[in-house]
Image (cartoon, grey):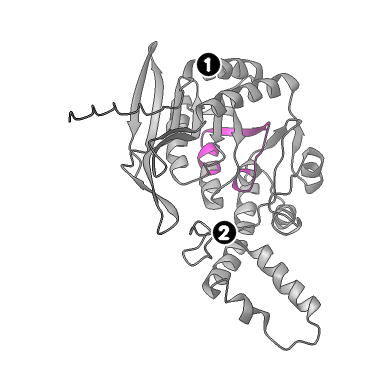
Amino acid sequence: MDNQPTPPPRKVKQPPILFARTQAVLERLSARLGGPVVTYWNNPRGSVCPDDVVALYEVLERIGHHDTVFLFIKSDGGSGQVALRFVNLLRQHCRRLVALVPLECASAATMITLGADEIRMGPTAYLTAVDTSLNHALSPLDRDNDRVSVSLDELNRVIRRWRNEQHDATDNPYKSLFEYVHPLVIGAVDRAESLSVMLCRELLAYHISDEARAHEIAATLNSKYPSHSYPILLNEARNIGLNAVPLAPEVNTQLIELNGLYSEMGQKATTDFDEFRAHGNEILNILECKDLQVFYQHDKDWFYRSEERRWITMNDDSSWRRIENVRGRLRRTIMHVA
C-alpha cells in the first residue's frame, strides 16, 4: 500500500503591521496639537509592565526634549511601580505633559495620567480607582489552575460582612478565610495598598505642590470607590481634584481612528493545528512616535496538557520589535530586552 503524502504544514497567521497608516494619523495629530505625540496602547491582554519603560526610552530618545509632550494612552492597567518609572522618564523629556484619553485608562494607566499636568478626556473616556490587587505566588487557583489576583478591598469587605452578620459569634473570621487565601497573601496585599497611595502621591507631586491636596486625591482613588473598575468620568475626575478637561472633538476622532488601527494590529492571529496544538501571534503593547514604532509580540506554540487542565507554551519566540523610517526606507529589527 502506497504511503499517503504528508500534507503541507499550515501557514502560521501573522498580525498586520500598519506602520504607514498609524504614522499618517500621528502626523495629523502632531500638527493639530502643535507638539510631538507619543502613543502608549495596550491590547486587553497586554499590561503596563517593566519592559515598557525600555521601549518608551527608545521612543523618547527619538523625539528628544520638548516643552510639551502629548501622550495618547489606552490601557487596562498593570504595575503601579512601572507607572512611576514611566512618568519619571516622560518628565525628563518635557516641561509639560498632557495626557490624551479617548477610551479606557484603568488602574496603573490612571496612575500614569496622575503625573500629567493636564488630562484631556473624550466622550467615551474613563479613569478608574487604583486600589491594589495582587497576583501572589500563593494566591488561590481558578478553574484553569492559574493564580488569581486578590484585592485588599475585597478581603476587607468579606471580613466586614462576616462581623456584621455574626453579631454573637466568637470565631475569628480569618480562621475560615485562611482556608481559601494564604495569610502571606493577605499581608502582601495590605502592604501593596500602602504602596499604591505612596505611588499616587509621588506622581501628583510632579505638578501639585500642596501635599495635603495630593494626599486627598491619592486616598480618594485608593479607597472611595466600591469597585476597582468603577468608571471615573470627566466630571468625577474634576471633582476629585484632577486637572481634567474635554478632549477637542477633532483630536478625539483622530485618536479613535488610531485606536482602530492598533486594535487591528492587536487582533488574535491564532493558527489551530488540532484540538491540542496551536500557534499564537498577537501584538500586546504598542508605543509610537514620528518615524518609530515599537511593539511587543507574542509568538509561541501552545499545547493543552489535559491532565493539568491548562495550556502550556513551547517554542516561544516572543519579543519586542521595532519599525523605523530611516531616510525613507523601513527597517525592522528585534529589540533584545532582558
What residue would you read off at disc 2? 149
Looking at the rendering, which quadrant does residue 36 occupy? top right
Q: Who's the residue at 75% across and 53% down the image?
A: 213
- Give the distance between the C-alpha atoms of the residues marked 2 and 1, in whole angstroms: 37 Å
Residue in front for this viewpoint, 65 or 284:
284
Measured as percent of width and height from the top left, residue 97 is found at 62, 34
| Dot 1 amino acid type | Arg
Left or right of 27, for residue 296: left
Report the amino acid beneath label 2: Ser
Question: Which residue is rendered at x = 55% and y = 46% of the image?
Answer: 83
Foreground residue, 283 or 80? 283
Q: Please, is residue 327 above or below residue 231 in the view? A: above
The residue identified by callout 1 is 21
Asked where in the image residue 126 lies, by quadrant, the reply is top right
Residue extending furthest front?
A: 1
Q: Which residues are magenta?
A: 87-109
Point out residue 182 in the picture as x, y percentages from the top left corner. 54, 73
Name the residue at 45% across, 22% down: 17
Residue lying at 52% horizontally and 33% vertically, measured from the top left: 93
Residue 205 % position (x, y): 64, 49
Residue 115: x and y, percent?
62, 43
